[in-house]
Image (cartoon, grey):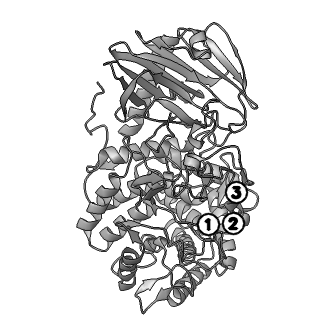
Amino acid sequence: MTQPDLDLGVVGNGSFGALVDKHARVVWSCLPTFDGDPTFCALLGPNQQTGGDFAIELEDFAGSEQEYLTNTAILRTVLRDAHGGELEILDFAPRWRQNDRFYRPVSLIRQVRPLAGSPRITVRARPLADWGARVPESTWGSNHVRWILPEHVLRLTTDVPVRFVRDGLPFVLNHPIHLILGVDESLNRSISGYVQEAFQRTRDYWREWVRYLSIPLEWQDAVIRSAITLKLCQYEDSGAIIAAMTTSIPEAPGSVRNWDYRYCWLRDATLTLQALLGAGYVDEARAWRDWLLRAVAGDPPDLKIMYGIHGERRLPEYDLPWLGGYEGSSPVRVGNAAADQFQLDVWGTVLEGLHVARESGLAPSDDAWDLQRALMNHLEGHWQDADRGLWEVRGPERRFVHSQVMAWAGADRMVRAVERFGVDGPVERWRATRDEIHATVCAEGYDADRRTFTQHFGGAALDASLLLIPRVGFLPWDDERVIGTVDAVRRELCEDGLVLRYRTDEGGDGLPGREGAFVACSFWLVDALEGTGRRAEAVALFERLLGLRNDVGLLAEEYDTVGGRQVGNMPQAFSHLALVTSAQQLSHGREHVTTDRAPLVPEG
C-alpha cells in the first residue's frame, strides 16, 4: 500500500476524529480523545507489517470515490475491483440528542455492503500502542476482538466471524457487515440493528444542526462543509477547539517544519468562535467561553497561546525517532514548544473574541468581564514588548506590526464595551492607551517610500497578517496605506497567485527550508480585495481556493504551489474558518438563508 496523500475524509463526533483515505483505510485516529496516543498512525509511516490502520481491503482494487452524505459528517467510500465488483463503506461516529442531552459514544462505526458483483475483501484492524512502537496484546470472544492499550482497552464488535478479522482472512462480501470500534463496552443487542439506528439518528442530528446555519446563497456546499468541519474540531467535553486533528504533517515535503496541532490555540479558537457566531451558533461559542474561563482561571496575565483540550498549560515537545514521518518527513513531534512563547497578539485576539461574543447576544458574564479587565491590565503594561508574533517564529523576538495592531484592537474593544454596554472600567485610560498604540504603529511600522506596512518595526520584510489591519478596524479599507499594503503583499508575497505567510529567507523564523502558501492568508487576500473594491478579483481568487480542497471539501494548512498539492496538518480549522469568513464577507449585504430552505440532494 502506498503512503496516503492528503486526499482524506474525516469523521468524528466531538470526542475524537478519524481520517479515512480513498482506499477506505483509517490511517489516523486518536481514540478516545484528539490529543492522545494514536490508535491508528499509518499516516506517519510505521512499519507496514505491523499496521497502524483499520482497513477494508478489496482484492484486485481498481478505483474508488469518496463523498459525504449531504449535510452530514457521514463519509461514503465506494471501492471497485477489476472484475465489476463494487462495495460501499459508510463511516461515522455516532451522536444524537437523547433525553435533552447529546449521546456521543466514543466509537467509530463502519457499515460495509456490496453494490455489484462478488467483491472479495479482507478486514484488517491493526491498532498500535505507544505511538506506533509496539503491537498491543489482544483477546477475542464470539463477536469481538479486544486490544489492551496502555490507557484503555479497545473493542471491535462485529457480525463478521471473528477469526476472519483476527487472522486477516479474505472472504466474499455477499451481504452487509458491520464493525463498531470503540472503548471496551459490550453491545447487548443486534449489531446490525444498533448500527442502523445509530446511522439514522446520526444523519438526522447533522441535518438538524445544519438547518440552522445562516449561510450566503452562493457557495452553500463549501460553507456547510467547512462549518461541519469546524464543529468536528471542538472537543465538546470541555469546549476547546483544536487547530487540527493531526501532528507532524510537513509544511513542505521533506521539511522539518512539522508541528503538533492537536491543541487549542486561543487565536485560532477565537476566530473559529467568531465564524460560528456569524453563522448563528451560540452554543458552541458559549462552550468555548466557559472553557476559556476555566483554562485561564487563577492567573490571567500568564495567558498561554495554547492549551491542551482539558486546559493543560504544559505541552512539552519531543520527537519520536521510530516513526518515519509523513512521506519520510521527520521528525514526528508530540507536544509544542511554542506553548511557552510570548505572543502579544493573543491578548488582543481574546479580548476581541469576548467582545464579539457579547455583541452577538451571548449572555453577559461577570467572570468574563473580570477576565477581560485582567487581560487589559496586562496588555497596558506590555504592549511595547517584543514577542514571537502570530507565526510563532523560533528566531529573535521583535515588535511585530500585527501584534501591535491586535494590542490596539484589544484596547479598542474594551473602550467600546464600556461605551455600548455600560460595564465598569477606566475608559479614559484605555482610550489613551489605544491612541498611543495607533500612533506608534503608524510611525514605526509603516514604510512610506514603499507605501506599505512592514512585518515588524525597523524591518523591510512583509507579512500576510498585515492584510488584517482593516478587518479589525485599525484603518478603513479605503485608506491609502491599506491599499498600498494589499498591493505590496500581492507583489512580494504571492506565488502563483497564492499568499505566503512571509518569505522564509527574510522572516527570521529560525528554521531551514521553505514552506507552501498559507491557505488562510490567501482567503485574507480575498477579503482585502473585496474590501478595497476589487470584487471580481476577490471572487475569482475565492473560487480558485475552493478548487484547492480535496475531493470531499477539506483543507489542510498550506498548499505547495510547486507540487500542486495540499501540505500541513489537516483538517485545519484556520483554513476552514477563513473560508467561512470570506464567504460571509463576499456576501455582505446580500441575502442569506438557513439551510432548511436550501436544497437537499438525496443520497443514492
Q: Which mark is residue 463?
A: none
Q: Is residue 588 visible?
A: no
Q: Which of the pair 282/263 is nearer the observer?
A: 263
Q: Amino acid at mark 1?
A: Glu
Q: Which residue is mark 3?
A: 296
Which marked residue is nearer to the observer: mark 3 or mark 1?
Answer: 1
Badges 2 and 3: C-beta atoms under 8 Å apart? no
Looking at the image, the residue that sits furthest to the left is: 536
Asked which quadrant contains residue 255, the reply is: bottom right
Label 3 and label 1: CA atoms lie apart by 20 Å
Instruction: Please say whether residue 338 is visible from this viewpoint.
Output: yes
Query: How far is the residue under mark 2 from the one under mark 3?
Result: 16 Å
* Category of crowding for the residue at label 3, using alpha-carbon neighbours closer than 10 angstroms: few (below 14), some (14–19), many (at least 20): some
The answer to which of marks 3 and 1 sits earlier in the sequence is 3
Numbered badge on residue 392: 1
Q: Which quadrant of the figure has residue 188? A: top right
**Quadrant of the image containing the C terminus:** top left
Secondary element at tag 1: loop
Number of residues whose C-alpha sits closer than 10 Å to that of mark 2, classed few (under 14), some (14–19) or many (20 or more): some
- Nearer to me, 94 or 19: 19
Q: Residue at x 49, y 23 (%)?
A: 56
Above or below residue 288? Residue 423 is below
Residue 253 screen position, x and y as percent: 52, 55
Q: Is residue 353 above or below residue 175?
A: below
**How many numbered tags mark residues here?**
3
Mark found first going from the N terminus, 2 or 3: 3
> What's the amino acid at mark 2?
Gln
Label 2 belongs to which residue? 341
Query: Contact (CB < 8 A) between labels 2 and 1?
Result: yes
- Please name which of the two marks, 2 or 3, marks the residue nearer to the observer: 2
